[in-house]
Amino acid sequence: MERRIFSEHVVTPEGLFRAEVTVRGGAILAIEPAKSASMGAEDWGADWLVPGLVDIHTDNLERHYQPRPGALWDAYGAALAHDGQCASAGITTVLDSLSLHGMKDGLDRKASLGPMIAAMDQATADRALRAEHLLHLRCEVTNPELLDLLEPHADHARLRLLSVMDHTPGQRQTTDVAGLRTRLLAGGRSEEEAQEFLVQQHQGRDPSVAHDNRRSVVAIAREFGVPLCAHDDATVAHVDEAHADGCVIAEFPVTLEAARASRDYGMMICMGGPNFVRGSSHSGNLSARACAEEDMLDILASDYVPLSMLRSAFMLIDRFGWAPEKALATVAANPARSVGLADRGEIAPGQRADLIRVRRGADGWPLPGEVWREGLRVA
């Protein structure tokens, strides 16, 4: 089946055009400049036509599996709810980012890992999902049980990214423990609650296993051909190690020094959409906007707010003066290429027909009115 769409704002790799896009068999067949819609074509007028978004880091599935502290939801239902939220935000490919360590707000990540992966597998098999869901496993190197959790999933068909990280207070993301305590207190926690939180962050960790665990994760990435991502690098030494390990993505570097070193090595720099929209990191680290100002922003991920991706891309256009094709690449083509997906992320012939119809709302908000995956409307 063939369909044609006209828009005054078609974002292609070459720029922004008034054009008509032809879709056939789930793929983009042609893009032709046009002043108006031809007979039989859908007329989207001033609404933008942009590529479906590719999200390489989101904690959103965990939030639906445990919507309240201590209250677990059905894993299959959580998969459907998470998927619906992603699709309605224009995300047509999502890497569900599952942490292989400890507790978060009462969620036992070790116990929940298997059910969440199995539920998403089943929903995929049932063709119940709107977006395509792939897998990103976040490897906490101080976890003595890390390999027991990782190895059963190392050859999983949906695995597309591994990341190495250390969230021990005093390291990388939380180098400033006093600052973390101050933020906890400012957020309403008592002194006792803040201290309990810090104690909990050390539980289940053994720094003595970090080196060997990291070497094992690197070996698994190489054996199975899975891209590797460095997380929360803070120093040049951290980045040197990441480059030596073969990391292709610098995810959430916490200093400009680390971001610059990552760029020098040719690593793609990924920051969080919520960080960009808010204008600062919730943990007090490097601002995504600072990366944009330094032209060191390659990828924006939703992190914990799916709608932040499209919002960030249009803020780059409206407030930072980025060309539309460069801004949209941060949430579509660049993340796709970073994990080896060459068939999506651009409005170009031969690419998957993953499309978003976007109109502009109050304060420039980009509103995804229609979302299409492989030529079929999913939201």
Image (cartoon, rainbow, N blue to C red):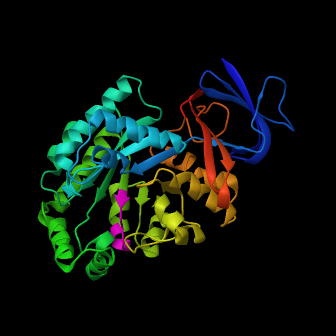
Q: Position of residue 157 (x, y in %)?
A: 33, 31
56, above or below 276, in the image: above
Q: In the image, is 15 to the left or to the right of 205? A: right
Residue ID at (30%, 33%)? 76
Q: Is residue 324 above or below residue 185?
A: above
Q: Residue at x 42, y 54 (%)?
A: 248
Q: Nearer the viewer, residue 55 or 154?
A: 55
Image quarter for residue 176? bottom left
Please indicate, yes or no, whether residue 362 appears anywhere in the rendered image.
yes
Q: Give the residue drawn at x 14%, y 62%.
A: 205
**Magenta span includes 120:** no
Q: Quadrant of the N terminus?
A: top right
Left/right placement of residue 47 relative to residue 87 reads right
Quarter where residue 232 is shown: bottom left
- The segment highlighted magenta reads 230-238
Residue found at x 61% / y 31%: 353
Pinpoint residue 37: horizontal percent, then vertical percent.
83, 32
Residue 83 placement (x, y as % from top left):
42, 38
